[in-house]
């Protein structure tokens, strides 16, 4: 018997019980749709995070103060006092592909403007910070090298801070704000940047020369810093620049062989890798949970096929009596099981696309359905039909023709 004839007979057999066939496929439809939707959510979130990390800057490398131990007690990452502006100068001299560099310190405080106030992040940085972050000035200017060297009390506002202190679209350049009873002149407003790689609002910040933050707000030595932001000359040079930065800082900090670094060097690729691994783990977990419904759907197919074998015992006996071989009967029921699972899988793929689009449109959740997920889902659906359909098909193929014809 040709495969086309087997398929034709299978479709006719399934069409005789349309309601039962539809309900049997429902488990497979729900399972495949759930897997597609979960994978789409995971891939969408991963793509969104990667784009946010990329938006942070161009070929950016970040050096942060590392672990600091005092009298044998670990003070924690980011607490080393040994990172300073001299390290920036050393990197600038010895790492030719470090295109832009900016020393940085960070704190948080209340900003007061007339009768308005706003609590925000204070980013102490240097003049090349906008180039590193690919961040343009909307109004006014960024501070200059002279203002950094003199620890001038000037400030550049993020758009969120400007909107909350003065109103949306207002030009506050030239006005003054107070931070810890220190008066600062506003010299610029940054353009809107949006959410960062961890969901934080990048526009909820003010920028002040790092020397000013140290001397005027923290009461510390103006050279001590907590991080260095660096932009490599090209994406291809990031690994080389990272290695050269590490060698330079180890030499500057007089670290001997075997001694741990008292700083951390991180690249955008590191951040993307860390976040992607976490996202992939969560996507795999969600897809695995959704995949349980595929197994349930397969068990449902097996159950219905066993019922079908019992109902059609006389038919099987008659077919075998007129010359059908055991393998023909086996193939017949196996094809019926595969058709059930495969059609259910294809409908489930369509439903998964629809659910993904609905989540994006109405809930603004980023989704992305990868082609390999569709192929795997449909392939798994077909494999499920073969796996769970084989036992009922083999049972039908092993029926005795004489006993089958006598079956009531």
Image (spheres, rainbow, N blue to C red):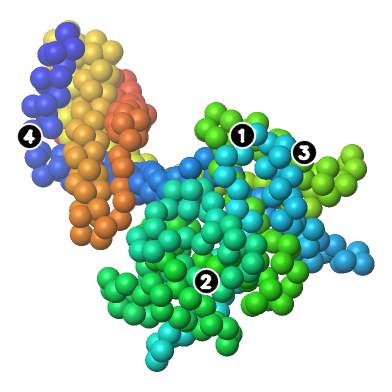
Of pointers 1 and 3, the one earlier in the residue sequence: 1
- Residue at figure coordinates x 55%, y 29% from the top left: 236
Q: Nearer the viewer, mark 1 or mark 4?
A: 1
Measured as percent of width and height from the top left, residue 257 is found at 89, 39
* Label 1 Cα neighbours within 10 Å, binned few <14 / some 14-19 / many ≥20: some
Residue 272, position as x, y percentages in the image? 51, 44
Residue that carries the numbered disc 2 in the rendered image: 154
Disc sitting over residue 97 in the figure: 1
Total numbered labels placed on residues in the image: 4
Q: Which structural element holds mark 1? A: loop
**Relative height, residue 157 to residue 51 (above, below):** below
Percent across and percent down for residue 350 are 19, 40
Please tell me which of labels 2 and 4 falls first in the chain.
4
**Which numbered tag is attached to residue 16?**
4
Q: Which of marks 3 and 2 is in front?
A: 2
Q: Mark number for residue 386? A: none
Q: Work out which quarter of the rendered image holds the N terminus and state it.
A: top left
- The residues tagged by marks 1 and 4 sit, at their Cα atoms, a distance apart of 73 Å
Q: Are there few (<14), some (14-19), or many (20+) residues within 10 Å of tag 3?
A: some
Secondary structure under the numbered disc 2 in the rendered image? strand
Question: Which-is-in-front pick, marks 1 and 3?
Answer: 1
């Amino acid at each position: 018997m040709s495969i086309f004839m087997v398929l034709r007979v299978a479709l006719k057999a399934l069409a005789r019980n349309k309601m039962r066939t539809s309900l049997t496929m429902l488990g497979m439809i729900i399972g495949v749709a759930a897997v597609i939707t979960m994978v789409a959510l995971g891939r969408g979130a991963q793509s969104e995070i990667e784009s946010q990390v990329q938006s942070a800057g161009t070929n950016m490398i970040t050096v942060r103060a590392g672990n600091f131990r005092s009298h044998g007690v670990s003070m924690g990452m980011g607490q080393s006092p040994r990172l300073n502006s001299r390290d920036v100068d050393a990197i600038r001299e010895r790492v030719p592909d470090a295109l832009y560099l900016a020393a940085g310190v960070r704190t948080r405080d209340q900003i007061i403007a007339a009768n308005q106030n706003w609590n925000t992040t204070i980013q102490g940085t240097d003049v090349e910070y906008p180039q590193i972050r690919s961040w343009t000035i909307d109004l006014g200017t960024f501070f200059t090298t002279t203002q950094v060297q003199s620890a001038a009390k000037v400030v550049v506002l993020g758009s969120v801070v400007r909107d909350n202190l003065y109103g949306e679209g207002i030009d506050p350049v030239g006005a003054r704000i107070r931070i810890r009873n220190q008066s600062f002149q506003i010299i610029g407003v940054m353009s809107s940047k949006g959410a960062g790689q961890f969901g934080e609002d990048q526009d909820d910040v003010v920028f002040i020369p790092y020397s000013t933050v140290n001397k005027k707000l923290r009461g510390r030595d103006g050279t001590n810093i907590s991080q260095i932001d660096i932009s490599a000359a090209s994406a291809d040079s990031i690994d080389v620049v990272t290695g050269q930065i590490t060698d330079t800082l180890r030499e500057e900090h007089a670290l001997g062989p075997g001694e741990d670094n008292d700083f951390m060097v991180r690249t955008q690729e590191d951040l993307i890798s860390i976040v992607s691994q976490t996202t992939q783990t969560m996507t795999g977990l969600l897809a695995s949970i959704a995949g349980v419904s595929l197994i349930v759907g397969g068990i449902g197919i097996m159950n219905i096929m066993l019922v079908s074998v019992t109902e059609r015992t006389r038919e099987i006996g008659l077919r075998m009596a007129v010359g059908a071989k055991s393998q023909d009967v086996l193939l017949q029921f196996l094809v019926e099981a595969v058709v059930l699972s495969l059609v259910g899988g294809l409908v489930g793929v369509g439903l998964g696309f629809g659910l993904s689009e609905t989540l994006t449109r109405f809930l603004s959740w980023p989704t992305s359905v990868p082609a390999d997920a569709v192929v795997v889902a449909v392939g798994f659906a077909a494999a499920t039909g073969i796996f769970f359909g084989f036992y009922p098909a083999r049972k039908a193929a092993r029926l005795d023709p004489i006993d089958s014809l006598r079956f009531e």
